[in-house]
Image: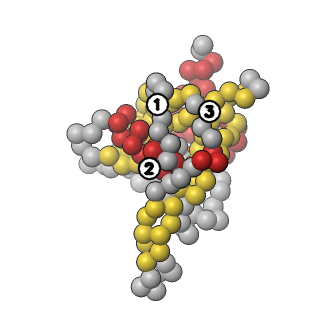
Amino acid sequence: MPKKSAGILLYRYEAGALLVLLVHPGGPFWSNRDLGAWSIPKGEYEAGEEPEAAAHREFLEETGIAVTGPLEPLGEARLKSGKLITAFAGESEFDIASIRSNLFEMEWPPGSGRMQSFPEVDRAEWFTLEEARAKINAAQKAFIDRLQDRRNRR
């Protein structure tokens, strides 16, 4: 059975333009990667946990901010790894200066025997839809498209 993740795609309007919030993964593997490396704040959940509850938990862990407003489902997307992501959208004025990610440990440099801590997310940024499509992991572009379709129907 594939691993499952859930996340939240926050959006806001600025001067009439729809912007979305993406996060950049922390750690040395991702430090010099940009295009295709960004993601919605998300994380894995186990059987029995509701995806929306997991999305709230993971957003808080990765950003330090609790999303309290209503969310709308954006459906699912499958990564190349086979992992299935369930996403939700919510409108918010998230302040990227206040991001505080949880940490993870890994051996770095590899083979050194030294464990180091790194933030799971090293930065967050608001992007236009065009910018976001270039920055986000390709499998997650569907969430941006679905959000745009829903906003255009309003």
Q: Farthest residue in the left direction? A: 48
Name the residue rendered at 32%, 46% in the picture: 45
Q: Is residue 146 visible?
A: yes
For disc 1, the marked residue is 68
Element type at mark 3:
loop
Give the distance between the C-alpha atoms of the residues marked 3 and 1, in whole angstroms.
12 Å
Horizontal relation, residue 88 to residue 133: left or right: left
Q: Residue at x 27, y 46 (%)?
A: 46
Crowding at dot 2, Cα within 10 Å, few <14 / some 14-19 / many 20+, comes out as many
Nearest the eye: 20 or 139? 20
Which amino acid type corresponds to the residue marked 1 in the rendered image?
A: Thr
Q: Residue at horizontal 33%, vertical 49%?
A: 3
Q: Amino acid at mark 2?
A: Glu
Q: Image quadrant for the C terminus?
A: top right
Q: Residue 122's x, y, as percent?
A: 58, 58
Residue 68 picture location, percent across and down: 46, 30
Place residue 150 in its image quadrant. Answer: top right
What is the secondary structure assignment of the residue under circle 2?
helix
The residue that mark 3 highlights is: 93
How much space separates mark 2 and mark 1, taking CA atoms? Answer: 14 Å
Residue identifier under label 2 = 61
Q: Earlier in the sequence, mark 3 or mark 2?
A: 2
Q: In the rendered structure, which disc, 3 or 1, sits on the residue that comes first in sequence?
A: 1
- Cα–Cα gap, marks 3 and 2: 18 Å
Q: Are circles 3 and 1 on residues that touch, CB within 8 Å?
A: no
